[in-house]
Image (cartoon, rainbow, N blue to C red):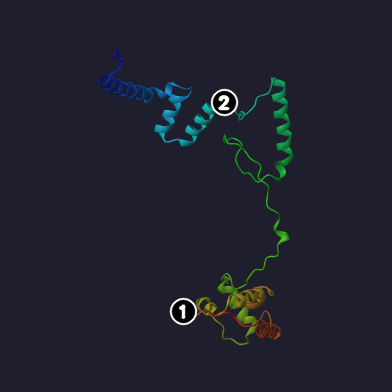
Amino acid sequence: MLLELPMTLKNHSISIATLQSLCHVLLKAFLVAWPLAYPGGVVAVKCWRAGDPFRLVARIRLWFSSLTGKRERPRYTTYRTPEQEDAYWRAAERTARAFRASDANLTPPGVPLVRYYTPRLPPTYREKRVVDAEATEYQLPPKAFCKWHRMVFRGPMHPTLKEAVKQIRYFSSRDRREIHRISRLVRDEEVFCNGARRWTACYATMWKRWLETKGPDLAVVFE
């Protein structure tokens, strides 16, 4: 006598469909309620929606470390007693006073920011700086040019202030600097007053020597 099995082919197909439906329901319930399955899940979902992946990764690492029984090292520590904390702040103040003379941090004390120590740059005397005389245009006063012209060139024909402004443009920056230097060798009263000082050839010789020894000038031509 053959006994009928409790699960026939028809019942077997129904049981598989029921099992699949049950698994689908359980999976759907897990996907919906998974933030409540471990600590910090709700915060992780908020981080994901806010677009903060770094905080989400930190939460996941914290959860896995709690599962394995390992705790991460805290990012900061506290002192056991207030006296130890006061001793730390007193030592920090002494160190700040010691480095204040060489601190280049210009943050005002009233600004609520962390004042990090910034060392100053070494003094400039360690580097030899070469200043190009033609790098910047030398501004020569027209009065100094007229004074120099009377000191170097003999005779009554000398430029006026308006003419000096136009003639200065034909001299280079090095020439203007030398003209200004020569004009300061004599007082204004000795040059501009008629008959106060007789003309001498020493300044003309000085200017001629400068033209012979200064070297070529750099000319810039625009076409």
Category of crowding for the residue at label 2, using alpha-carbon neighbours closer than 10 angstroms: few (below 14), some (14–19), many (at least 20): few
Closer to us: 154 or 112: 112
- Tell me which residue sits at (73%, 31%) in the image: 91
Category of crowding for the residue at label 1, using alpha-carbon neighbours closer than 10 angstroms: few (below 14), some (14–19), many (at least 20): few
Q: Residue furthest front?
A: 1
Residue 105: x, y in percent? Answer: 63, 44
Residue 101: x, y in percent? Answer: 72, 44
Q: How many marks?
A: 2
Closer to us: 140 or 24: 24
Q: Amino acid at mark 2?
A: Thr
Residue matched to label 1? 222
- For the question of whether residue 192 can be seen, the reply is no
Closer to us: 209 or 153: 209
Label 1 SS: loop
Residue 18: x, y in percent? Answer: 29, 20
Please give the label number shown on residue 68.
Answer: 2
Circles 2, 1 touching at the beta carbon (< 8 Å): no
Q: Is residue 34 left or right of residue 198?
A: left
Q: Is residue 61 left or right of residue 152?
A: left
- Tell me which residue sits at (74%, 39%) in the image: 98
- For the question of whether residue 82 can be seen, the reply is yes
Q: Amino acid at mark 1?
A: Phe
Closer to us: 133 or 70: 70
Rendered position, 170 above or below 49: below
As measured in the structure, the alpha-carbon distance from the residue carrying label 2 to the one carrying label 1 is: 78 Å
Quadrant where the N terminus sits is: top left
